[in-house]
């Protein structure tokens, strides 16, 4: 699990790209999106939705309380 500080606070996601299993280890992005270091696919940190044309999404989790992660939109 990887955590980054986004516009809305801390968000979490598995460090495995839904496209072909690359990693987000370098977090090539900004406060609103994360970019895979392998093929540069982009995902919203708010919704997990892939950029236009990708047709995929990254599961995004948020912290509830002090120790529970819940998938956003689930
Ligand atoms: S593996 Fe992430 S964009 Fe291809």
Image: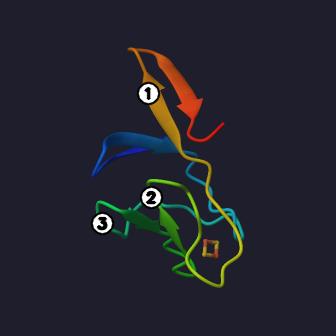
x and y percent of residue 62 in the render?
47, 34
Q: Are marks 1 and 3 in contact (CB under 8 Å)?
A: no
**Sooner in the amino-acid sequence: mark 1 or mark 2:** 2
Quickly name the residue at label 3. 30
Mark 1 and mark 3: span between their CA atoms?
20 Å
Quickly name the residue at label 2. 25
Q: Is mark 1 within 8 Å of ligand 1?
A: no
Q: Which image quarter holds the C terminus?
A: top right
Label 3: few (<14), some (14–19) or many (≥20) C-alpha neighbours in 10 Å: some
Label 2: few (<14), some (14–19) or many (≥20) C-alpha neighbours in 10 Å: few
Residue furthest top as drawn: 66
Quickly name the residue at label 1. 63
Helix, strand or loop at label 1? It is strand
Mark 1 and mark 2: span between their CA atoms?
20 Å
x and y percent of residue 12 in the render?
47, 41
Q: Are marks 1 and 2 in contact (CB under 8 Å)?
A: no
Mark 3 and mark 2: span between their CA atoms?
14 Å
x and y percent of residue 43 in the render?
52, 66
Helix, strand or loop at label 2? It is loop
Residue furthest front as drawn: 73
Q: Quick check: 70 above or below 33?
A: above
Query: Disc 1 vs disc 2: which is toward the camera?
Result: 1
User: For this rendering, which residue is in front, 54 or 14?
Assistant: 54
**Sooner in the amino-acid sequence: mark 1 or mark 3:** 3
């Amino acid at each position: 699990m990887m955590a980054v500080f986004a516009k809305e606070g801390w968000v979490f996601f598995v460090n495995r790209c839904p496209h072909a299993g690359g990693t987000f280890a370098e977090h090539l992005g900004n406060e609103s999106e994360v970019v895979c270091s392998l093929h540069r696919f982009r995902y919203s940190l708010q919704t997990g939705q892939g950029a236009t044309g990708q047709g995929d999404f990254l599961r995004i989790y948020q912290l509830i309380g002090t120790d529970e992660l819940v998938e956003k939109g689930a």
